[in-house]
Structure formats: C-alpha cells, structure tokens
Amino acid sequence: MKKSGIVFDIQRFSLHDGPGIRTTVFLKGCPLRCMWCHNPESWSREPQLMFYKEKCVQCLECIRSCSKSVHLLKQGKHVLDYQKCDACGECIAHCAYGALKLSGGEMDVDTILKEVIADKSYYENSGGGLTVSGGEPMLQFPFLEALLGEAKTLGLYICLETSGFARKELFARIAGNVDLFLYDIKHINDEKHKKYTGVSNQIILDNLDYLYRMGAKIRLRCPLIPGVNDTAEHIGGIAALARKYPKLTGVELLPYHDMGKGKWNQIGKEYGLCDLKNTDQEQKDILRRHFLEAGCEVMMN
C-alpha cells in the first residue's frame, strides 16, 4: 500500500461532509468532468498552478522567473499558457502578492493523520471524524487504502465521499474501513449523465447495489443543478432508489451554488454552466416538496 499521495486541501471543523465535526481530506484526481464542478482543480492527479488575477499587480516577477514562458503580458494583461506549466513553483516563490498558488502536493499518511487526530476530542463529542473526499478518492486507491487502514486503527469514524465510479473489487477491499459512504448520484438518466459528467452511470449504480447488499452504510448525496437534474425524471429516480434500498442512512440534497465558479478561470478553464443562479430558500422548499410528493424524505445541505 502506498503511504503518500497528492492532496489539494485539508479542511478542519467541516460540518457538511458527514455527521458531527469532521476533518475532510481532499485527494486530487477525478474521472468525471461535471459541468458544475466546484473543485475543478481536483480533476488532474498532478499538482497544478492557480492564478488569482484579482491579486496580481503586474510586477512581472513571475515573467522574469519562469523559464517555460508560462507567464505572458498581452495587451497589458497578465495571461498564462497553462499547457507549458510543469508546476515547478518557481514563479510562486517570486510572487509577493499571493496571486499564484500550487494546488496539490504530496503528503504521507502519517503527516495527514497527525493533523486529523489533533481534533479527536471534537470528533468524540460530536460523533464526527475523518472524511476523505476529492476529486474521486478511489483514483488514488493504494494511498487511499493505506490512509483508511491506519485511520481505522486510531479509532476514527470514517466517511468516504465518492462518485462510485471505480472497480467493484476496489470498493470490496476498503468497505470494512469505511463507516459511511457519501455516495453521489448526479443523474438517473444514463445519456444525460454522460452529457453532463462525461461518464456513464451504470458502474455507479452497479456499485451502489453491490455496497448496499454487502451491508455498507450509505447516504445518497444528490447535487440539484437547475436545468440539468431538477426534473421529475431525476427526482422520481432518486425516490425509486430510496424505496429499493430502504436501509440507506438518508438522501441528502446539495442545492446548486457557484462558490467554485472562479476556480475554473484560476486554472485556465471556462466554466461549464455560466448562466446559473444559486438556489434560494424558496426553490429549496419547492424541491423538498417535490421529493416528498415522490415518496422520498430528504435532508438539505
């Protein structure tokens, strides 16, 4: 089992990634390309440069320091040629204004767990623990397996947030060290799932069935994206899954927000769903009512 992997964030005192107070560790790499993704910097398995243009004062130190000609001044504007960047970090060292950041770095299991275990008293008092998220954590499986195994020896309550898009035998190997799967269902219609995420949902639904039948505790997590999956078809499909798997620990709705929209530009990508507005409370109430009418009680994040 691999003892180190690429991590792009660790968030302490997280309240929305499983029960209680948690520390969430975000692993880089994802096989999906969701058009609404709020962590697009998680797609690549490798560290990558992020540019915060609002912090840039055009001091030009990055241009002078970069041997790959990643940084350019075009028509008076600082632009980046991300294709040339190898994430060496040299430009970051010369930026005094915090306009450049490297997303992702190698961390070993012991270093991560030392940070996680520092808040163990909070976990014990709140029913919290460690959540591993991404990206898709299963994409760094040897590292994930090592991290979960050692976390379990420390007595941590472990959640794994997953898209379900991985080989069944890999889920079988880690299921004993996961107390709760936070299992994403993005679209019940396979063709629309392909359109909006880039992959089929068949493996995802098959793995859901497999984990449920082997006795894993699972909470469905359902992002609701206006115009994408806030439809009678999808709502009915989620309700059908809840009826098929009555021992699910719940169905959690994740209303749309655009908090990650700016990240797309920071890594040189164009946001996939540029005209959407955040889901307001009235819309949340309507969605909740639609699910209840379909016979499915839901939690709302």
Image (tube, rainbow, N blue to C red):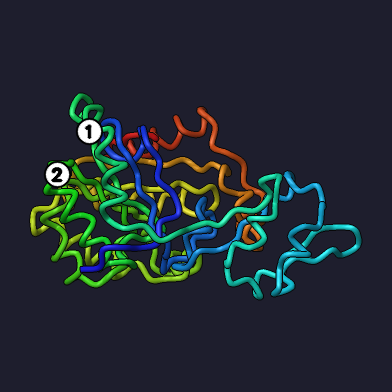
Expressed as whole percent of the image width and height from the top left, the position of residue 90 reads 63, 63
Expressed as whole percent of the image width and height from the top left, the position of residue 241 reads 24, 52
The image's mark for residue 120 is 1
- Residue type for callout 1: Lys
Q: CA distance from mark 1 to mark 2?
A: 10 Å
Name the outermost residue toward the top: 125
Given residues 282 and 273, the one toward you in this image is: 273
Q: Evaluate whether residue 34 shows in this view.
A: yes
Expressed as whole percent of the image width and height from the top left, the position of residue 171 reads 19, 64
Left or right of 59, for residue 112:
left
Name the outermost residue toward the right: 75
Q: Is residue 287 above or below residue 263?
A: above
Q: Which residue bears the numbered disc 2?
A: 154
Q: Quadrant of the C terminus?
A: top left
Left or right of 123, for residue 53:
right
Q: Is residue 194 above or below residue 20?
A: below
Expressed as whole percent of the image width and height from the top left, the position of residue 220 reads 28, 48
